[in-house]
């Protein structure tokens, strides 16, 4: 079994910052790409940032310059630093990772349960 657990969401004022963290656990052999997505009310889920095991990152245009993704391969964590928050960043944030379990030949995509970020004064 593999689990991804996110922490760090909450209520923040516009202009503030948050750091979200996601930890992978279970019978993991290898973790490939990790990322963060978000889903605002009434909108489709949007991929905002990804990071490879080698540290290569990609960001959605809407978050470039404000979001930074980090990864610790030893701790099996992926963090998302969010700065200069606006109400438009209000959403449930999900982490996901492509993970190969011990004894399996191919990786699968796993998702966390999500953490709510609300930006409001």
Image (cartoon, grey):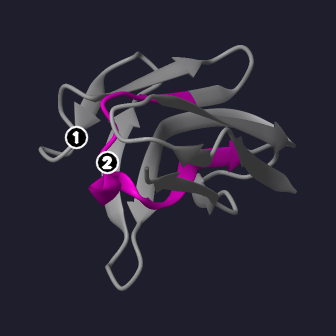
Residue 12 in percent (x, y) is at 51, 42
In the image, which is nearer the foreground, mark 2 or mark 1?
A: 1
Q: On the rendered structure, is 3 left or right of 40?
A: right
Name of the residue lying farthest toward the left: 61
Does residue 85 appear to the left or right of 3 in the view shown?
A: left
Please tell me which residue is depicted at 45% across the width and 41% down the height of the picture: 13
Please state the extent of the stretch shown in magenta in the rendering: 79-100
Q: Main secondary structure of the magenta part?
A: strand
Query: Residue 63, percent across and down?
Result: 22, 40
Which numbered disc covers residue 103?
A: none
Q: Are marks 2 and 1 in contact (CB under 8 Å)?
A: yes
Task: Give the residue at x 87% y 44%.
Answer: 26
Residue that carries the numbered disc 2 in the rendered image: 48
Instruction: Residue 82: say if magenta.
Output: yes
| Residue drawn at x 67%, y 57% as measured from the top left | 112
Above/below status of 114 relative to 34: below
Sooner in the amino-acid sequence: mark 2 or mark 1: 2
Distance in Å between CA atoms under marks 2 and 1: 7 Å
Picture coordinates of residue 54, whole percent (x, y):
41, 16
Q: Is residue 105 magenta?
A: no
Q: Which residue is mark 1?
A: 63
Label 1 sits on a secondary structure element that is loop
**How many C-alpha atoms fall within 10 Å of the one at disc 1: few (<14), some, or many (≥20)?**
some
Q: Quadrant of the N terminus?
A: bottom right
The spot of residue 55 in percent (x, y) is 39, 17
| Outermost residue toward the bottom in this view | 42
Q: Residues within 10 Å of mark 2 (few under 14, many from 20)?
A: many
């Amino acid at each position: 079994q593999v689990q991804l657990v996110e922490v760090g969401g909450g209520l923040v004022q516009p202009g503030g910052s948050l750091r979200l963290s996601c930890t992978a656990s279970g019978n993991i052999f290898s973790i490939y790409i990790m990322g963060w997505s978000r889903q605002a009310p009434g909108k489709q889920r949007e991929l905002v940032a990804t990071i490879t095991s080698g540290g290569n990152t990609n960001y959605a245009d809407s978050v470039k310059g404000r979001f930074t993704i980090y990864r610790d391969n030893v701790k099996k964590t992926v963090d998302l630093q969010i700065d200069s928050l606006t109400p438009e960043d209000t959403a449930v944030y999900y982490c996901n990772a492509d993970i190969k379990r011990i004894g399996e030949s191919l990786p699968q995509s796993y998702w966390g349960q999500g953490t709510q970020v609300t930006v409001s004064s």
